[in-house]
Image: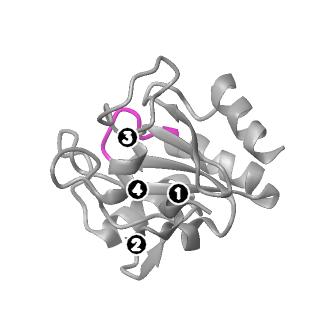
Amino acid sequence: MSDLLDLPLTTLDGEPTTLGALTAGSAALVVNVASRCGLTPQYEQLEALQQEHAGRGFTLLGVPCNQFAGQEPGTAEEIAAFCSATYGVTFPMTGKLEVNGPGADPLYRALTAVPDATGEAGDVQWNFEKFLLSADGEVVARFRPGTTPDAPELRAAIEGVLA
C-alpha cells in the first residue's frame, strides 16, 4: 500500500477524506480539471472512461485547479453543477487544489516527481494532465494535457493496470 493513498484530501462537497478512500482500492486516473479551458471537452471522454471501466476496479478522480489562466474560478457548488449539467460527470472530485509551486498540494508534489513518457518530471504543464495509479497507489504513468482520454496509449495503460 502506497503512502500516496493515505494523503488527506477534501471532496468537492467539503468532506475530509483520503486518496485511498476516494479511489476505494481501485486503479485510478487523477486529472487536474478546469471548467473554462479549451481542453474542458475532455470531461466527456473522462466520464466515458469512468463508465467503461468502473466495474473493473477503476475510478477517475477529478481535481479542480485554478492555477492556469484562472480557468476554474467557480465555487465548489458551481463546479459541481457545471460538471453534472454539462458533462454528466459521476466520478469523484476533490476540492480545488494547487498543483504547482510552493502551495502545491502534497498529492501533486508526489505525482509531479514521476516522469512522463519522455522522461520529464516536474510541474504540471496545464489543465487536464493525467496520472495513472495502480490499485496499490503507485504512479505507473503520466500523460500530458494534450493526450486525450481516448488516446490509444492512455487506454492501453489503463488496460495494463486492470489486467
Q: Do the CB atoms of the residues marked 1 and 4 lie less than 8 Å apart?
A: yes
Please tell me the numbered disc located at residue 63.
Answer: 4
Report, in whole angstroms, how far the alpha carbon at label 1 lies from the one at label 3: 16 Å
Taking the magenta stretch, the answer to whether it contains residue 152 is no
Upstream in the sequence, badge 1 or badge 3?
Answer: 1
How far from the left and from the top, in percent, is residue 145?
A: 42, 30
Q: What residue type is disc 3 on?
A: Thr
Q: Do the CB atoms of the residues marked 2 and 3 lie less than 8 Å apart?
A: no
Residue at left offset 59%, top offset 63%: 90
**Mark whose residue sits in front, 2 or 1:** 2
Q: Which residue is disc 3 drawn over?
A: 112
How far from the left and from the top, in percent, is residue 87?
A: 53, 52
How far from the left and from the top, in percent, is residue 72?
A: 27, 52
Q: Main secondary structure of the magenta part?
A: loop
Report, in whole angstroms, how far the alpha carbon at label 4 lies from the one at label 3: 14 Å
Q: What residue type is disc 4 on?
A: Val
Q: Give the side of residue 17 with respect to residue 45, left or right.
A: left
The residue carrying pointer 1 sits among few (fewer than 14), some (14 to 19) or many (20 or more) residues within 10 Å by Cα, namely: many
Q: What residue type is disc 1 on?
A: Leu
Magenta-drawn segment:
36-42
Upstream in the sequence, badge 2 or badge 3?
Answer: 2
Q: Do the CB atoms of the residues marked 1 and 3 lie less than 8 Å apart?
A: no
Please tell me the numbered disc located at residue 8.
Answer: 2
As helix, strand or loop, the secondary structure at mark 3 comes to: loop
